[in-house]
Image (cartoon, rainbow, N blue to C red):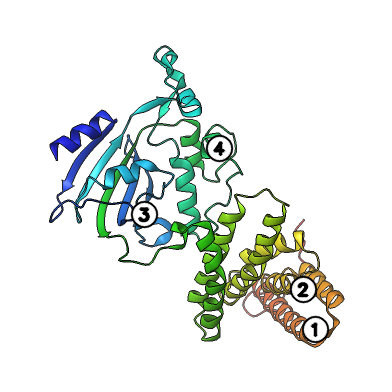
Amino acid sequence: MEEEARKLLEEGIIKKVTSPGKGELSTFPNGTKVVFHYRTSLCDGKVLDDSRTMGGRSKPMELILGKKFKLAVWERVVITMKQGEVAEFTCDNKVSKLDIWNGVEIWLCLYLPFLLIPQHTALYPLVSQSLRNISAGKDPLEGQRHCCGIAQIHSHHSLGHKDLDQLQANLQPLVFSIELLEVLAPGSFQLDVWAMTDEEKLELVPQIHEEGNMLFKKGEIKEAMEKYYNGVACLKNLQMKEHPGDEVWVKLDHMITPLLLNYCQCKLLQGQYYEVIEHCSSIVFKYEDNVKAYYKRAKAHAAVWNEVEARADFDKVLELDPSLGPSIAKELKAMEERIRTKEKEEKGRYKDLFNYNGTPATVTTVSLL
């Protein structure tokens, strides 16, 4: 263990064991699955991410070793740990920006310190953004540009989180507190979607779609939604490798659309109306004749009192598919009844506001200007 700690130190990683694990150290061959909790902090103690609280729930990280995870330092440090061990790793090795670009040692860095960035933590802002997206039920790649990680580091594109933007602008050493929960040998577990090859992912999507449909029919909405989300994320990952508008990109997009619409149906049932509006808007922006997208967006608008938008979408549905007239009439009637009920309740509140001791109000008009 002392020899391993020395090697880590040479690589710019300081390991501090806070709770020793049990048993022997695994050999960690490629294909091993490691499950661990992590907490990422700045050197001043400020916490950036914690897998125990991210997204309001405790969900450990899972890695398949040898799959070239974007944050290579996590693979490097977990192979020094026993199952059950808790350790703190301070990663402070710096490397030239030019070295990253060219793959050559640049001696000028000795004289130009501003060309140095933390090697082990340079890509953490991007990794954190993806992990936060996942915890929020979004596409892991949402908000990331179609370019390599290093190019994104030096761009001024916001990651959607103030702390990550600050970190990206001022890359610095980080402290990873890791608890290794489980080590699974290759072949002893089913591969997660993200760990599959592109071909395996493409073959799996129809199965995921069907499983989602079966769960939906059983009324297991949350479980079905997760299936649809996994299918969308899987295809989005493949789509990111293509140029928008190319034949393969369009083919993948046609596979994404029905999955995304099913996902939106689950969100409608869960009352997540604004997310439905967002996703359906992205669909009709590309496919102006998608009846289902307009219909679901109309229902979501109606649910959040966007009467004008809801009527416009229902009109579009009627234009595209007149056979849905009875269904739309029913939806419009329900929306109008809800609006009347709401207006009646609001009038009652105003009446109470301008009546005192049971005396009828003399003010009949309230000006808010």
Label 4 sits on residue: 152
Mark 1 residue element: helix
In which quarter of the view is residue 324 placed? Answer: bottom right
Mark 2 residue element: helix
Question: What mark, if any, has residue 324 been given in the picture?
Answer: 1
The CA span between labels 2 and 4 is 37 Å
Mark 4 residue element: helix
Q: Amino acid at mark 2?
A: Val
Comes first in the chain, label 4 or label 3: 3
Residue drawn where x is 52% and y is 68% of the image: 204
Residue drawn where x is 29% and y is 30% of the image: 12
Q: Is residue 224 left or right of residue 192?
A: right
Q: Is residue 129 visible?
A: yes
Comes first in the chain, label 2 or label 3: 3
Label 3 sits on residue: 63
Label 2 sits on residue: 291
Comes first in the chain, label 1 or label 3: 3
* Residue 138: percent from left, percent from top: 54, 59
The image quadrant where one finds the C terminus is bottom right
Disc 1 crowd rating (10 Å Cα; few below 14, some 14-19, many 20+) is some
